[in-house]
Image: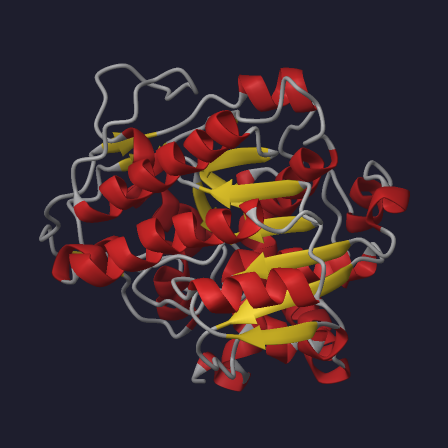
Amino acid sequence: MTQIFLWYMALICEICVICGLPIYFLNVHTSASPLRRRNTLDTKFWQDKRVFITGAAGLLGSWLTAELVALGADVVGLIRDDVPQSLLIRTGTINQIIIARGDICDYATMNRVMAEYEAEIIFHLAAQTQVGIANRAPISTFETNIKGTWTVLEAARHNPTVHGILVASSDKAYGPQTELPYREETPLDGQYPYDVSKTCADLIARSYAHTYEMPVAVTRFANLYGGGDLNWNRLIPGTMRSVLRGERPIVRSDGTFKRDYIYVRDAVYGYITLAEQLARPDVQGEAFNFGVSRPISVLEMIENIIALSDYADLEPIILDEVEHEIQDQYLSSEKAKTVLNWQPQFSLADGLKETMAWYKAFLGPGTGG
């Protein structure tokens, strides 16, 4: 049954790609279909809303852009580098939005885009997101994640049309803590380059909110996964590609590190839900955790992925070479649930099934792509 299901899902994914349809149209038998979830959103709020998304070609940016276009928003997407395999391009969503090219650290570009397109809502997603790259090249990470954040916020401060800014922080901003799960009142204590960059961006965003009374909110998401992530160094994309090819997956750590994982469609739902409520005084200037609150180890995640493949006897290769990463990280999302009425709609099993189907279609016949 698993093989038949994956083949069927892969076929639908491939049809979506060929026809230029956003992949979120994929309809599977999960607890939350896209249509049902979209009915919980305020379509009138988004109709003709002028939205500016930094990092529009990234994993989250691609999915969020597609959903906002479907809700009727007028989207301007900031792209720095051309990535032909980006989901934004593969689905044809790029042809439905305005593209602005530039660097988030360039104040003149940020100010021009916000002013000329009269941005109302800003989703600041652009970032250098790779922990390994941050450890090897911290300066570029600090430039993008810290300077980029204050540049976007400063430009927004001088553009009167802007009435909502959502800034992407991360669970990594909390740093190593003795008490888990992380809660929003947990002090931010990033220690390694990527974690520090997110701690700083988080604090800067809330500083702008409180100092200038700007409508800013900060998101701290758990580890994001979903179709369209082509960074093969990440656990889920890399493992899925390996097992689809019948190869043993590589584990950089010792496999015991625990993380919380959230499916990209739940993340999109979280961003849109938060944006719709950003005018509330109890939301402005606040940070919100978004996760599933069900941490699993790296090895457990790999076992889940292998179970979805045709190669149940695969064993991972454990390198145990990771340095400067936090052992265990997971979030409490109780604040998002009580204040925003948000909660994840996808189980890990459902999210992984959809994601595996996407990679099977993307990698092509024989999964040798």
Q: Nearer the viewer, residue 340 or 38?
A: 340
- Does 122 sit above or below residue 340? below
Q: Residue at x 45, y 74 (%)?
A: 80
Q: Is residue 341 above or below residue 224?
A: above
Residue at 71% over, 65% down: 117
- Which quadrant holds the N terminus? bottom right
Inspect this view and state whether residue 268 appears.
yes
Q: Is residue 26 visible?
A: no
Name the residue nearer the viewer: 27 or 300: 27
Q: Quadrant of residue 30?
A: top right
Residue 237 percent across, percent down from the top left: 41, 62
Outermost residue on the right side: it is 44
Q: Give how far across and how far down residue 83 sits, in percent.
A: 47, 80
Specify the quadrant that holds the C terminus.
Answer: bottom left
Q: Position of residue 131 (x, y in %)?
A: 25, 53
Compared to residue 195, the image places residue 233 above or below, namely below
Q: Camera-side residue: 296 or 7?
A: 296
Residue occupying image coordinates x 56% and y 35% = 216
